[in-house]
Image (spheres, helix red, strand yellow):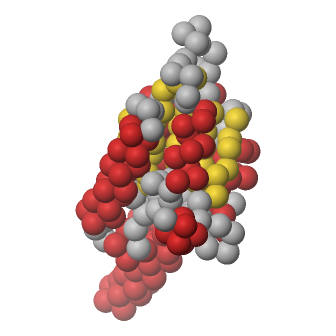
Amino acid sequence: MRNPLRTEAEAFSFVLVFVALAVVVGLAVWLAGPKVGFAVFLALTIGIGVGLFLKSDPKVTEPAVWDRHRPDGVNRILVIANETVAGTALRDEVVSRARDGASEVLVVTPALNSRIRHWTSDEDGARAQAQDRLEASLASLGASGVRAKGQVGDDDPLQAIGDALRTFPADEIIVSTHPPGRSNWLERDLVGRARETYPCKITHVVVDLEAEREAS
């Protein structure tokens, strides 16, 4: 079962839910007495527990849901990147791995969002920005001779990988991040967690967008 509090946004949401629960139970006690307050607390606690259980996703912790032993000879490469998705270093890595023409490439860009917007389910802006970066990446790969598909993924990059693997049985995964000290994904040990979760080759590519801009 997936830990429902693996991301900062989910932990922040949990705190807000806990505060709201305390307020509702306090009002119930004040208005109707301790017995009613306890009944409200019990009902809400059960409801929250059921919600977290339904939200948990076994596909993240059961990587064997996809078949990596296929006879078609096609090497499938899954790329996970957000702000660095159109970086030169990432493009060059993908091109070098897909140069033989017998590869399929899927680029997934998580729709990262602020905690407040995540809590209010306001994700349109984040998805639109992710889509723009994704299209720039696909155009860059296409200009380099790599035909790739793309999709906007879950705001949790580890979850986005799991979602993609359900329909795209990758042989290898490329994770692109900012350099250490500037990467939220590295602070959350995304690469290490992915390697613990998925039994396939995982390559970490560091993209320094500032250095690339200066070089260009």
Instruction: Single out the residue that lies furthest toward the top.
Output: 71
Image quadrant of residue 17? Answer: bottom left
Can you see residue 25? no
Nearer to me, 92 or 61? 92
Q: Is residue 128 visible?
A: yes
Indicate the quadrant where residue 188 lies: bottom right
25 relative to 90 in the view: left or right: left
Which residue is at the far bottom? 30
Q: Which residue is found at the position 48% from the left and 26% from the top?
A: 104
Q: How many marks?
A: 0
Please identify the quarter of the rendering in which residue 167 is found.
top left
In the picture, the quarter occupied by the N terminus is: top right
Foreground: 44 or 123?
123
Q: Residue at x 52, y 46 (%)?
A: 91
| Residue 78 percent location from the top left of the image | 53, 37
The residue shown at (36%, 91%) is 30
Residue depicted at x 68% and y 41%: 202
- Specify whether 147 is left or right of 206: left
204 vs 121, nearest the viewer: 204
Residue 171 drawn at (x, y percent)? 61, 28
Instruction: Report the residue that reaches farthest toward the front.
Output: 216
Instruction: Please determine whether, in this image, residue 168 is positioned above or below residue 70.
Output: below
Front-lying residue, 172 or 124: 172
Q: Position of residue 25 (x, y in %)?
A: 41, 81
Residue 56 percent across, percent down from the top left: 51, 49
